[in-house]
Image (cartoon, rainbow, N blue to C red):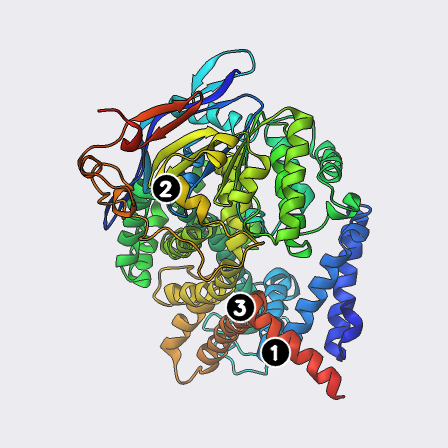
Amino acid sequence: MKPILEIKDLHVHFYTYAGVVKAIAGVSFTVYEGETFALVGETGCGKSVTSRAITRLIESPGRIVKGSVIYHTKDGRKIDLLKLPEAELRAIRGKEIAYIFQDPTAALDPLYTSGYQVAEAMVVHRTVRSWKDGIKRAIEILRSVLIPDPEKRVKAYPHELSGGMKQRVVIGTSLSNRPRVLIADEPTTALDVTIQAQILKLIESLKRRHNATVMLITHNMGVVAEIADRVAVMYAGKIVEIGNVFQIFKNPQHPYTKGLLKAVPNPLIKVEKLESIPGTVPNLINPPPGCRFHPRCPFVMDVCRVEEPPMVEVEPGHQVACWLYTKR
Amino acid sequence: MSGEEYQKSVLDRVSDLFIELLAKLIDRVRPGWYERNRSKVSEWKLMAYALNRSPPGVIGLILVLAFIFVGIFGPIIAPFSYRYFAIYDAPGSDLAQPGTVVVTKDNRTLYFPLGTDHFGRDLLSLLLQGARTSLVISIITIALGVPFGIILGLVAGYYGGKVDELIMRITDIFLAFPALILAIAFAAVLPERIHEVLQSNAWLRDFFLWLFALDQKDAGILSRPLAVILALIIVWWPGYARIVRGSTLSARENLYVEAARAVGLSNRTIMFKHILPNIIGPVLVYITLDFGGIVLMEAGLSFLGLGAVPPIADWGRIVYDGSQYFPRAWWLIFIPGLVVILSALGWNLLGDALRDILDPKTRRSIEFKLKKRRREE
């Protein structure tokens, strides 16, 4: 497997009035070419921030304070996206690495037609010769993302489209330049369940057709099980467990991953009370010392409170950051 | 889809006709435009219906259209030139009452419907000519001051941080002085500098003479109204920088701005194509309201003796010169004063009505009322 994105020791801080929020503290992982990589975790654990940091979309008051994002280009060069000049990075955003955002209702500019917004992405990267060609291509793209009657829909404004339709337009925009990496940040959260499945299937099939790499950010374990190849579990700005989808689901090691999987309700069994992980996500201005999960952990030991656990490999390709698995 | 639902008044038919005409005109220039933008045209009609339901708005629109019409054609339809001093031809024609008929030495009869000033110049002609002065000054002030303010506000709001601090502190410095005082200061010192520029640039001088519809003989005093324009621009942009910065701060938080960055658009494209069009509504309303403000302030500066000087016709200056003959020559004060008030009022009424129409929330309620009335009938 060839790596396409290597994130190494990423640190992102937000400088707020209340203090410095250490939203990402030393995240490292590798995404391989052609796979579907899922980043899962609770709200506020830093999944979205990590995904945005990859192409430096972090805005003030946030700042990437440390780390590197190595991107392997098609011709085999390695470039660090965090050190690239703004203009060169712009040429990569949307062309090589594209995003799908969570809320399709807000991701489209209300003042432009869907066709214009799809065409704009191609015009800016000069993958089409003119606006006219862009609109023509936009019709094809809208057809490929299964929008009925695309000739008519290119002229439709966002408010004239349904939520699922808008998300298809957003996906169309992202795929218009045939990106090598597609970062989908909770692409189905704002949609209802029936459309979720359609959108996921669409992303899968488009991924296969264009041979793209997908990085999926979600808190929905069902979605992860459905389409991911490898999974990284994040908690409070750190990756706690990483492995392929079978390892994570069949053999979860970290107490947090276990809790997360237990919290997914089984529709076939009626339970008195839904499972949850006791406690709340820690305040990242003053994160707990040692392992960040220790205040909520059922297996907490003395060492957890003072020292951060290192990443250890429990089986090939399956790593976990927990003192339970570290021989001392 | 939209038109048939409403009970149309005469005014609506007039606005329909006008909009159809405009649409056909655009269609003539760009064939096929009408077909592609059918929904846009019906949207315009709907806006016109909403405006027609607001009597102050209609009055404002009529006053504004009258002001613009007179501003453009006034110097042409004026019965006398603003440089025709009747006092040389007909002694005793100075400070003539409104409606006076005077016979000149060579037996021509001159009719002064609104009376004359102390040079025997026809007041009606001066007012018509003065409308051009007022219109040109307000348009140039808006056309240069507003974009300047908008760009600074956009940059400050979009980039934030140190850029924002720097731009907004400069804006604060300008806002710290009362606008009129600042304008007086600039209008007092600028004419000499502008005069030099005009001396060395004949084409610029001729262009402004044409714009103000002035005689070549007045080239020497052209710098005075131009100084007023510059002074007004200097005091006018900070307001726009503030408004636009504020709106930009909230508009840039929209996800589509982040999506635009993720697509790889440059900051300039994002600012001008995805932020500015989304915040331009309130700015347009401010522009309309400010036209009235500029007409007033320009008249005010001239009244203080800082703007145009005779023989250039200027509403404020007519009042200033006439004040020395008050109360005998009351018409020299009341009539130009009324004209200034009406034009400023027109812009304000129109601006208020536009604010209701351009705001989607109040707009909906207006349309709802339209439909309800239809149902009752």
Residue B349 appears left or right of A131: left
From the viewer's side, name the closer residue of B167 and B99.
B167
Q: State the SS at label 1.
A: loop
Secondary structure, mark 2, is: helix
Q: Label 2 lies in what chain?
A: A
Tell me the CA gap for discs 2 and 1: 63 Å
Direction top: furthest residue: A76
Q: Amino acid at mark 1?
A: Ser
Q: Nearer the viewer, mark 2 or mark 1?
A: 2
Q: Both on one chain, marks 3 and 2?
A: no
Is the C-beta separation of discs 1 and 3 under 8 Å? Answer: no
Where is residue A298? Give x, y as percent. 29, 45
Residue type, mark 2 in image:
Tyr
Q: Nearer the viewer, mark 3 or mark 2?
A: 2
Which residue position is annotated with label 1?
A: B54
Q: Label 3: which residue?
A: B355
Give x and y (percent) for residue A174: 60, 35
Q: Which label sits on residue A256?
A: 2
- Do dots 2 and 1 share one subunit? no
Residue B189, percent from left and from top: 30, 50
User: Looking at the picture, how far across and down is residue B118, in whole percent?
Assistant: 45, 73
Element on which disc 3 rests = helix
Residue A211 or residue A165, whichever sits in front: A211
Residue occupying image coordinates x 73% and y 32%: A133
Task: Say above or below: B290 vs A233.
Answer: below
Marking on residue A258: none
Residue sitting nearer the eye, B105 or B3: B3
